[in-house]
Amino acid sequence: TIERAVANLLDNAAKWSPEGGQVEVGVHDGEVTVRDHGPGIAEEDLPYVFDRFYRASSARGLPGSGLGLAIVKQVADAHGGQVVAERAEGGGTRMHLRLNLGSS
């Protein structure tokens, strides 16, 4: 569900944020943006973060199964959207979940 996808993005950002750090969330025109201020995703890991069971070497000591971001991608695909991860300026990671929800 969309709720699960957003929850996974928030959980992931909280996991990587420093203690007491901020997680920034924005919603605009069918896009949810979540940004953390953690160490960021290594450039070489960016193409794989949405693959099932993929865990970057820096994540292997943390709890998780490598499924959270894969579920986000599955939800995005199911709604004709996409999810993109990028290194945020100043450190951390920014995730963009774009959905094509159509009009009701």
Image (cartoon, rainbow, N blue to C red):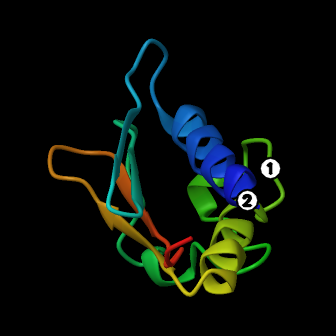
Q: In the image, what residue occupies the spot 79% across and 65% down? A: 67
User: Where residue 42 sits in the image (x, y, percent)?
Assistant: 40, 65
In the image, is residue 40 above or below residue 22?
A: below
Q: Which amino acid does label 1 sit on?
A: Gly
* Relative depth, front residue between 4 and 59: 4
Left/right placement of residue 77 relative to residue 29 reads right
Left/right placement of residue 80 relative to residue 27 reads right
Q: In the image, what residue occupies the spot 79% across and 42% down? A: 63
User: Label 2: which residue?
Assistant: 68
User: Where residue 57 sits in the image (x, y, percent)?
Assistant: 61, 62
Q: What residue type is labelled 2?
A: Gly
For label 1, the SS is loop
Q: Quadrant of the C terminus?
A: bottom right
Q: In the image, what residue occupies the spot 70% across and 50% down? A: 3
In the image, is residue 3 above or below residue 41?
A: above
Q: In the image, what residue occupies the spot 68% across and 59% down? A: 2
Distance Cα–Cα, label 2 vs label 1: 8 Å
Residue at the outermost left position:
89
Residues marked 2 and 1 touching at CB (< 8 Å): yes
Left/right placement of residue 38 relative to residue 76 reads left
Residue at the outermost top position:
20
Q: Nearer the viewer, mark 2 or mark 1?
A: 2
* Residue count near mark 1 (Cα–Cα under 10 Å), binned few <14, some 14–19, many ≥20: few
* Residue count near mark 2 (Cα–Cα under 10 Å), binned few <14, some 14–19, many ≥20: many
For label 2, the SS is helix
User: Where residue 37 sits in the image (x, y, percent)?
Assistant: 34, 36
Residue at the outermost right position:
65
User: Label 1: which residue?
Assistant: 64
Left/right placement of residue 20 relative to residue 26 reads right
